[in-house]
Image (tube, rainbow, N blue to C red):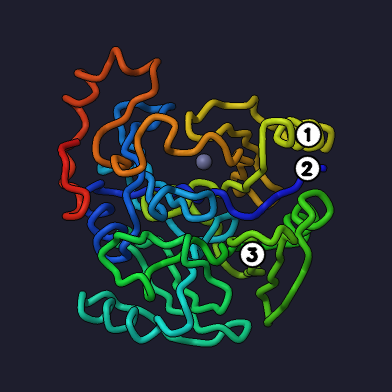
Amino acid sequence: MKQILGIHHITAIAGDPQTNLDFYAGVLGLRLVNVTVNFDDPGTYHLYYGDGVGHPGTILTFFPWPHAPQGRRGTGQVTGTAFAIAENAVDYWTDRLAARSIAFKGPFDRFSEQVISFSDPDGMGVELIATGTTRNDRAYQAGPVPLEFAVRGFHSATLSQADHRETVALLTDTMRFKLVAQEGDRFRYAVDSGEPAGLVDVLRAPNERPGRVLVGTVHHIAWRTADDDQQRSWRTELTRLNYGVSPVMDRKYFHSIYYREPGGILFEIATDPPGFSVDEAPEELGSKLVLPPWLEPERASLEAVLPPLRLPARQEASV
Ligand code: ZN
């Protein structure tokens, strides 16, 4: 039977690619696991961050659009991208952010866990949530942050909605999330997969303005499914329910279908396989510009228009 296993990846829009790389690899200590281009717009980068191998559930990706306007956080958007950290890592992170003059809120309590909340350099909402259920094997083992404090994949994401009811119906009736907690206008749902990154919060925000998806906002959220067969079943069911589901797209590292949930957020269902080792050895991930076969003939012209990137120290190599 088909099942959503949790969050697969979250994709957002950044401004300057180097600023984005310095923040996510340098400050948050994620691994740059893949440097490629946006397959739908090959003159721009697509940067993937994750744990050491880019496990589903750890992957945050960006389309850097240096000349695009600033977006606006609001309803119909993923307004919070939360990473998991260990319970003993809170002081380490408040110190680390303070030492880099990054303003943050917290730690404050949410569902009995400690939350540190801040914005990335483009204004995107990021959280670190201390939880007792993190997995060491979802951290970047060789990253710049000591392993015991390192980010361990996603904790959850927050979906903001002016009217949350139809979004909730999709999550619970169709995608089989279950309500596990509520605090005020925040409703927490979980999938019963036994996998990390299985939580999503729906935030009821009737007085907020609708968001605008541009620089500093999340473009879409992808949910994990085990394989192509399950993805086909999801596509059949969502089509029957009149979601305008895309055809299956080959994203090289996973296969994807896209549909818009009733509140306006772009959802994707992505397969676990084949993963990032399909075209790079694990130790080489993120060390150079990787192109899909159909764009390889255009490598020279693409490299001429893509801005140069200075990789983080532990990943030194030319892109
Ligand atoms: Zn995606």
Q: Nearer the viewer, mark 3 or mark 2?
A: 2
**Residue at image mark 3:** 199
**Residue at image mark 2:** 2
- Please, what secondary structure does the residue beneath circle 1 have? helix
- Residue plotted at (73% across, 77% down): 181
Given the image, on which type of amino acid does mark 3 rest?
Leu
Decide which of tag 3 and tag 1 comes sooner along the chain: 3
Vertical arrangement, residue 150 with respect to residue 264, above or below: below
CB-based contact (under 8 Å), mark 1 and mark 2: yes
Q: Is mark 1 within 8 Å of ligand 1?
A: no
Q: Is mark 2 within 8 Å of ligand 1?
A: no
Quadrant of residue 300 within the rendered picture: top left
Please indicate, yes or no, whether residue 65 appears anywhere in the rendered image: no
Q: Residues within 10 Å of mark 2 (few under 14, many from 20)?
A: some
**Residue at image mark 1:** 233
| Pick the front one: 39 or 289 | 289
- Please, what secondary structure does the residue beneath circle 3 have? strand
Left or right: residue 26 versus residue 30 is left
Q: Give the image location of residue 222, x and y in percent.
A: 58, 46
Q: Is mark 3 within 8 Å of ligand 1?
A: no
Q: Give the image location of residue 308, x and y in percent.
A: 15, 38
